[in-house]
Image: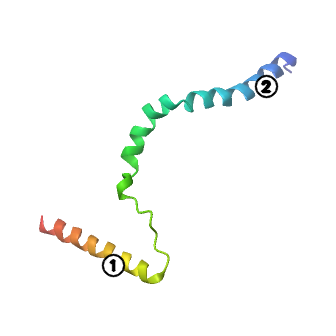
Amino acid sequence: MGGPNLEVFKFAVYVFFPVVMLVHYGNPDWYAKNVLPYKEKIFPPEHRINTNIPTDSTTLKEELAKIRARNLERKAQREAE
């Protein structure tokens, strides 16, 4: 079919294509320019993320009650408008 030159070309593509993609998309400047703006749009801000996850049932029930109360307040505000 192709011969040894084709096999060398295919090997070069298989080896260097991932390396080139890694160099291009792994560049910190490219990441800051193209990825970080979308990260701020898609994911919530850091101050809204709760990292203290309740481990026992009483704390969990308290947190659920807080969330439900907050949701009821928001619902009442939307209905008032």
Q: Which residue is mark 2?
A: 11
Residue at figure coordinates x 18%, y 71% from the top left = 76
Dot 1 or dot 2: first in sequence order is 2
Q: Label 1 to label 2, Cα distance in Å?
A: 61 Å
**Where, by quadrant of the figure, is residue 33 drawn?**
top left
Total labels: the figure holds: 2
Q: Which residue is mark 1?
A: 65
Position of 81 compared to 54: left or right? Answer: left
Quarter holding the C terminus is bottom left
**Where, by quadrant of the figure, is residue 66 drawn?**
bottom left
Residue count near mark 1 (Cα–Cα under 10 Å), binned few <14, some 14–19, many ≥20: few
* Residue 51 higher or lower than 26, as above or below: below
* Residue 9 higher or lower than 26, as above or below: above
Amino acid type, label 2: Phe
Quarter holding the N terminus is top right
Residue at figure coordinates x 54%, y 29% from the top left = 27
| Residue 39 x, y percent position in the rendering | 42, 44
User: Between 4 and 21, which is closer to the camera in this rendering?
Assistant: 21
Q: Secondary structure at mark 2?
A: helix
Amino acid type, label 1: Ala
- Tell us which disc is closer to us: 1 or 2: 1
Residue at figure coordinates x 46%, y 69% from the top left = 53
User: Between 21 and 46, which is closer to the camera in this rendering?
Assistant: 46
| Residue 78 x, y percent position in the rendering | 18, 65
Q: Secondary structure at mark 1?
A: helix
* Residue 15 higher or lower than 52, as above or below: above
Position of 20 compared to 37: left or right? Answer: right
Residue at figure coordinates x 35%, y 55% from the top left = 47
